[in-house]
Amino acid sequence: MELSERQLKILQAVIRNYLETGEPVGSRTISKYTDLSLSSATIRNEMADLEEMGYIIQPHTSAGRIPTDKAYRLYVDTMMSAKTEEIESLRETLMDKAGRLDHLLKEAAKLLADNTNYTSLVTTPSYRGRRVKFLQLTDVDELHVLLVMVLEGNLVRNKMLISDVPVDKEVVLKLNILLNTFLQNLQLSEINLQMVAQMKEQAVGFESIVEQILGALSQELRDADAVEVYTSGTTNILRYPELSDKEKAAELLTTFEEKTELTQVMNNRLESEDGTRGIQVYIGNENSMEAMKDCSVVTATYQMGDGVFGKIGIVGPKRMDYDKVVGTLQNLMTELDAIFKK
Amino acid sequence: MELSERQLKILQAVIRNYLETGEPVGSRTISKYTDLSLSSATIRNEMADLEEMGYIIQPHTSAGRIPTDKAYRLYVDTMMSAKTEEIESLRETLMDKAGRLDHLLKEAAKLLADNTNYTSLVTTPSYRGRRVKFLQLTDVDELHVLLVMVLEGNLVRNKMLISDVPVDKEVVLKLNILLNTFLQNLQLSEINLQMVAQMKEQAVGFESIVEQILGALSQELRDADAVEVYTSGTTNILRYPELSDKEKAAELLTTFEEKTELTQVMNNRLESEDGTRGIQVYIGNENSMEAMKDCSVVTATYQMGDGVFGKIGIVGPKRMDYDKVVGTLQNLMTELDAIFKK
DNA sequence: ATTAGCACTCGAAAGAGAGGAGTGCTAATA
DNA sequence: TATTAGCACTCCTCTCTTTCGAGTGCTAAT
């Protein structure tokens, strides 16, 4: 069941042509398109074989052929000519935004979408079990205390606490020491009830504040590890007829809006990482989400720090320009890595 | 050119009917719908008059009539029966999220969209010229210093600064005092070069840090006043045939995605507030944005603090259920006010 | 093994009615 | 005088045909 040299060339021509036009491609087109100099009749015979092998299908009798998922898979695995795609003015734009992670990632998503004309997804880096770097309490006014939490990865969170009893500078100072003594360098699962009890013992009269602090801390530790997804260019799917009929478009767009589901799509393979951090391509039904069975999803993993990874990805029609998309992602991935290594 | 009692009733019937069905409504329908017990012929005569006055039009010769913007305007101004629309489980859901403003507002947007089946917009409250409540510097490690900025409205921001010279606790303490002496209670426009020079004079050797602090501060003061817009239910527009053809849908959805433009739509009238904080309705061409000329936009203003307002709004087809939308917005507005007053 | 030739298939686009909802006008009615 | 029944007319929508052409598979010739 091996594909002959010639069949490969023909298949490749069919795919390339279909990627460009989106129309079923006929034998005559191929006969001219390739440098094989074969007549359309010959091509027809070969195409019949390719169809039997499951690489191409006819949408209806008397139409040209279109590639199947199997063909795309073969194309992506062996025939792609991944050109390194320049992202327009990437470096400067990103550097501008490097100040705040959320801005940076949003900008990255925008760049991806603008450069590819597909929809882009970018996830925040995912920690698992982030640790407390240090905590700091500051008195704002008599009843308000500001809690600043610095977590592993220099993630800073804050929460305004409201005390039921007045707190003065001295109390704040004491609490600060207490907090850091107990909680520094711990992660969520290491904070147990015994410690909580001890802390309360040492902060008589201010149990409520301690309670609040622990609540806020646990909340933030959980939140901070929750992966967020930014999307951009969602409406680009409307450019592609095969995705833009009412139902499909609505379903896809809704999926993009409900970010929660997307985290699953994006985190699919974060686990089964086998050392090399590569580009992953999911074609059609290879996608875990029903809504995306007519799409292809290409993802790459960027590295923010030791063991801290995030994903960037593109969602588009199955006939997407894989070469370009892979190149673009690769490029952006490298760029992000560099920024974080700064 | 006054409308007779009867004409009003007929017009109202036309509008009501059209709001429900989205189909042009004919004279026969009205004749049965209303309690006027008039024959269709009579209705026809009146409708011809209403058409002449610009309240209704025929999409084509032998079709029923549909309301014009003018009719909607009249309806909204005088005929609406604003029922107070319960928002499902509103209070509990919102209370849950009250911790973080962004979460709260996103949830509010979601509630609006889910309850109305239209698209919702929610802006963050807009300050103008927010003041510095206090600043606090903390040493994280030898070269990293954490700047926490507490702004008016208890908005907390932070930024990790990187010093080129080592800073110890003493320096941090000194800088803390310096910063607060100079900058407390100031707003962006009040921080001038003279002060900057003076500060640098008093912090010899740490000019770079001071520079960074001022940069971060100015950035945040500007950012904090920038209004953000959260959207929800954007795909709901696909439910309404008059908005869901490819071009219009794409244009609208893109507008929703590019939040920047939306801030203008939403802040349209924040200025010309004439004391009473009401619901505002923009019908069709009354909208400032071209993309929304086939939509109606209804907005309400919620209050977060003294002089600090934000907007919530609904975008839908012109034939939206104004009664319900107004009721829902009113309800949510009250609810938000209450939460912020807590 | 390749190719020219040809009959065949089937979808897309264009055209042709048929049906029907709704109108405006006129004349009859209360 | 205001209302209504009646009727011819318009024009949209739906369905059914027809036409057209791209593309195929098969056969026979090269």
Image (spheres, coloured by chain):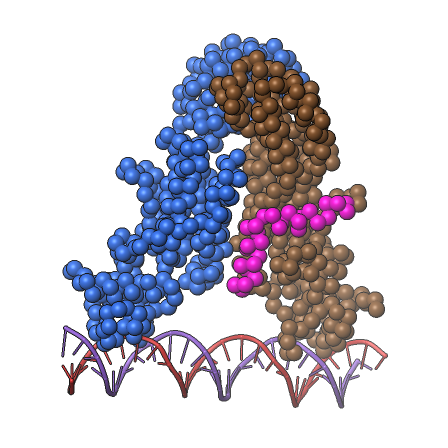
Chain colours: A blue, B brown, C purple, D red
Quadrant of the frame with the C terminus of chain A: top left
> From the viewer's perspective, is residue A311 above or below residue A188?
below
Q: Is residue A208 visible?
A: no
Residue situated in front as seen by the camera: A259 or C25: A259
Rendered image quadrant of residue B108:
top right
Q: Is residue B134 visible?
A: yes
Image coordinates for residue A337, horizontal then vertical, percent = 40, 37
> From the viewer's perspective, is residue A190 above or below residue B289?
above
Image coordinates for residue B106, horizontal then vertical, percent = 56, 41
Dominant SS of magenta comes to helix
Please report the residue visible at 81 percent of the width from the left and 67 percent of the height from the top: B4
Rendered image quadrant of residue B215:
top right
Residue situated in front as seen by the camera: B160 or C27: B160
Bounds of the magenta segment: B245-273
D18 left or right of A99 in image: left
Image coordinates for residue A89, horizontal then vertical, percent = 49, 47
Image coordinates for residue B252, horizontal then vertical, percent = 57, 57
Instruction: Say whether residue B258 is magenta.
Output: yes
Rendered image quadrant of residue A293:
bottom left
Quadrant of the frame with the N terminus of chain A: bottom left
B98 left or right of B46 in image: left
Instruction: Say whether residue A224 is magenta.
Output: no
B305 left or right of B220 in image: right
